[in-house]
Amino acid sequence: MTSVVLQRPAVRRRRQCSGPLILSFSVLLLSTTVAAFYSSSLSRVPRHHNQQQQRRLHRHYTITTMRAHNKEEGPGNAEEANLYVDRSCTGCGTCRSLCPGVFGALGLRTVVERKPLDEIETRAAYRAMVTCPLGAIRLRKPDPLVKEVVTHDFPTPLDPVALPGVHLLGYHNRESMGTTPYLIVREGGAGNIMIDAPRFNGRLAMQIEALGGIRYNIVTHEGAAPHHDLWHAFFPTSERVVHRMDVTREMKGQVEAMLQGKGPWFIDDDIKIVALPGYSAGAVGVIYYPPPSQSSSISGSISIIISSSRNNGGILFSGRTIGWSPRLNRLDGFAQFSRGSLGKQAESIKALAKEDFEWILPSEGLKYRLPEGGRKDAKERLLTEAADRFSELGRVGGLSM
């Protein structure tokens, strides 16, 4: 019998080349640098964050890095200004509301119309840059004033005289479609209330902590606080207040104070929560009645009360139910963002006429002061007209930012 011996075919040795070796070392160096960046970023997360939250931040940094390809300058920016708006801008109007003299609309986008006139306006423009949910506002050359703005300017008092205790938090979150978050600073900071939530930022969290932290985080509509878990991890004694109909899958089991039914609900005697179904099934509005001397205190948790006998005007945080549209130059419900029933939203707008408030601070659009001090008949006429126009145009009304 003849035996067969299997032999391996001769392997042709490649000629040694230094090119692939150099490329391998370059890739290794790049990977090490990226890993060090992520490690240093995650090391700034508070120690009480769990692994799931760290993975979420890791994903956030990754997405932000991938989005950097669309950062070239867009058309229409003033060449003499150190600021410009890049092509990633979606025209949300956040910067135009914070610094209207510098930023303006060009079609459906925002551009830098002129350079800031002085340091006050420059700081306002830099606050808008930090607030931009897409990071679409850039600098042509570095300015040390940016660091000072980031360090000291947030939270920003909105109007200490007309709107005492109300602060803008900045850092709008692209995951919430740029929802405007607010902070209500109450007596001694013990009962501070965050309306919706900005994107999580450690420096901002420490500045809020210096003002007394957060006692309640009220979510006005579905999707308005995607980083609620990160904020709660930093302020573990805070309570998230969400209507049962707007508790998302990610929120299940994490809501400390769940609203049910049609309300209204009260936190002490200066916070009233009203149901505003429409934009989302569990959308709510928050009415804050600032005391004349900011001397009220907080005690206990949320209690349900059937009626209230308050007579003084308040400040309405309206979510995305209604706000002032600078493009349409009127109050609007921003139908293009609505996740629910436009008919119900229009009814909620009309129902606000019976509430007692003078200011509207929306999550979308600009703040608005009602004429005639929020007198009931004038308010009813204005809100009814806004609801009717909203119903008439519907989603066909187009972009109304």
Image: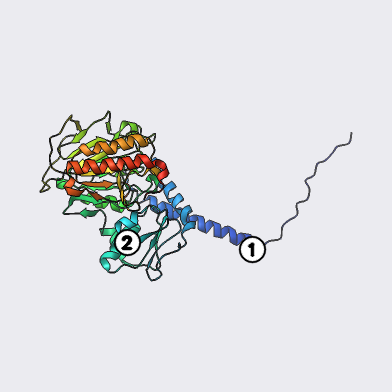
Q: Give 167 or 107, whichever is nearer the viewer.
A: 107
Residue 164 seen: yes
Q: Nearer the viewer, mark 1 or mark 2?
A: 2
Q: Give 139 or 209, whichever is nearer the viewer.
A: 139
- The quarter of the displayed image where residue 241 is located: top left
Residue 315 spot, x, y in % from top left: 20, 45
Is there a contact, CB below 8 Å, between mark 1 and mark 2?
Answer: no
The single residue placed furthest to the bottom in the displayed view is 80
Point 53% across, 56% down: residue: 28
Q: Give 239 or 363, whichever is nearer the viewer.
A: 363
Residue type highlighted by circle 2:
Tyr
Name the residue that disc number 2 marks: 126
Name the residue that disc number 1 marks: 18
- The quarter of the displayed image where residue 54 is located: top left
Q: Which mark is residue 67?
A: none
Q: Secondary structure at mark 1?
A: helix
Q: Secondary structure at mark 2?
A: helix
Image-based side of 39 in relation to 303, left or right: right
Point 84% across, 38% down: residue: 4
Image-based side of 80 in relation to 299, left or right: right
Which quarter of the rendering shows the N terminus? Answer: top right
Residue 92 spot, x, y in % from top left: 38, 52
Give the mark nearest the N terminus, 1 or 2. 1
264 versus 195 height, above or below: above
Residue 211 spot, x, y in % from top left: 20, 50
Residue neighbourhood size for the residue with mark 1, other residues' Cα within 10 Å, grouped as few (<14), some (14–19), many (≥20): few
Residue type highlighted by circle 1:
Ser
Image-based side of 136 in relation to 367, left or right: right
Residue 236 seen: no
Residue neighbourhood size for the residue with mark 2, other residues' Cα within 10 Å, grouped as few (<14), some (14–19), many (≥20): many
Residue 234 spot, x, y in % from top left: 29, 44
